[in-house]
Image (cartoon, rainbow, N blue to C red):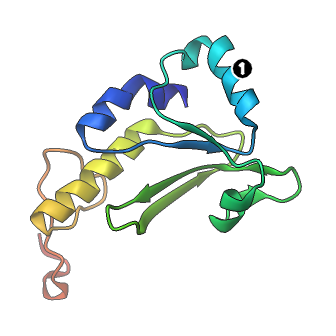
Amino acid sequence: MAAVAAIYRDLEAMNVEVLALSTDSVYSHKVFLETSPSLKNVGYPLLSDRTQEISRAYRVLDENSGAAFRASFFINPEQIIVAKLVYPREIGRNIDEHVRLFEALQYSKVTGKGTPANWKHGDSGVSKNPKNVGRM
């Protein structure tokens, strides 16, 4: 969450809404926000999934521990999950990749083009027409 907090204003400028969710209680969130220097500037909602209902529905609940895996869901304005990244507990998120994915999704929506491997903001896209497979 700290890395997301650091670029939250940039995400807002991209019209991205951020919500954080964990199986911790709202009281845990409050203490965490008050005591963690890296989270003092979190400007987005922290949601508690104490019942594990959301984590289970999104298929990221570790039933053995009762905690959710680190996961990020990319939900478009039509409320459809268009991408999902799930990380093992010992691996942190790659926020740069999250931003690249947001940019690629937005680019594709605006231009109607796809984005090739390793695409980054400013690169050109590719036709999504199947007749153009293998061509730029």
Rendering coords of residue 114 (x, y %): 21, 67
> Which three-letter amino acid code belongs to the residue tagged 1?
Val
Q: How many labels does the image show?
A: 1
Left or right relative to 51: residue 127: left
In the current view of this chain or complex, which residue is farthest to the bottom?
Answer: 131
Residue that label 1 marks: 31
* Quadrant where the N terminus is found in the figure: top right
Residue, x 62% and y 20% (percent of image)? 33
Residue, x 59% and y 11% (percent of image)? 37
In the current view of this chain or complex, which residue is farthest to the front?
Answer: 27
Residue nearest the viewer, comparing 117 with 76: 76
**Which picture quadrant has residue 129?**
bottom left
Note whether 7 is above or below 101 in the view shown: above
Classify mark 1: helix, strand or loop: helix
Note whether 21 is above or below 29 in the view shown: below
Residue, x 69% and y 50% (percent of image)? 69
